[in-house]
Image (spheres, rainbow, N blue to C red):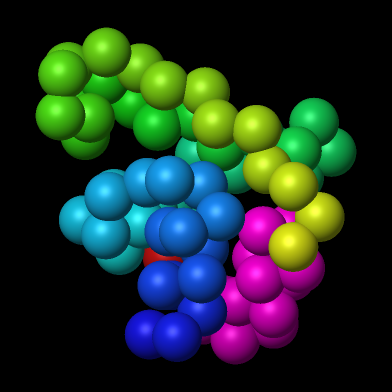
Amino acid sequence: SALALRFSILTAARSTEVRALVWSEIDVDAAIWTLPAERSKNDNAHIQPLNAEALEILAVMAERKHPDTDR
């Protein structure tokens, strides 16, 4: 939960958006997170640039990810 809070602060995302994030929304090579319109508050897709610290958090979470899920 501490990493989710840090990620939320770094991306200025709502906690519900961060908690529902799936790996298919992340493009590590381009350093962006694409939040689909159906999950955004205003029903518009949102492309969020990811800084180095946000990418580090994702790297840690990728190591902890269950191999059979997109979460």
Q: On screen, 31 above or below 4?
A: above
Main secondary structure of the magenta stretch:
helix
Q: Along the horizontal axis of the image, is 3 left or right of 22?
A: right
Is residue 29 magenta-colored? no
Q: Residue at x 75, y 38 (%)?
A: 31
Image coordinates of residue 44 in percent, x first then y, are: 27, 13
Residue 56 is situated, as x and y percent measured from the top left of the image, at 76, 68
Magenta residues, as a range? 54-68
> On the picture, is 28 further left or further right than 43?
right
Q: Report the front residue among 27 and 52.
A: 52
Can you say which quadrant of the picture contains the C terminus? bottom left
Give whichever of 32, 11 is nearer the camera. 11
Q: What's the residue at 68%, 43% (across, down)?
A: 50
Q: Residue at x 15, y 29 (%)?
A: 41
Q: Nearer the viewer, residue 64 or 11?
A: 11
Question: Residue 43: x, y in percent?
Answer: 17, 17
66 relative position to 18: left or right? right
Q: Can you name the residue that lies furthest to the top here?
A: 44
Give percent across and percent down for residue 13. 37, 46
Quadrant location, the N terminus: bottom left
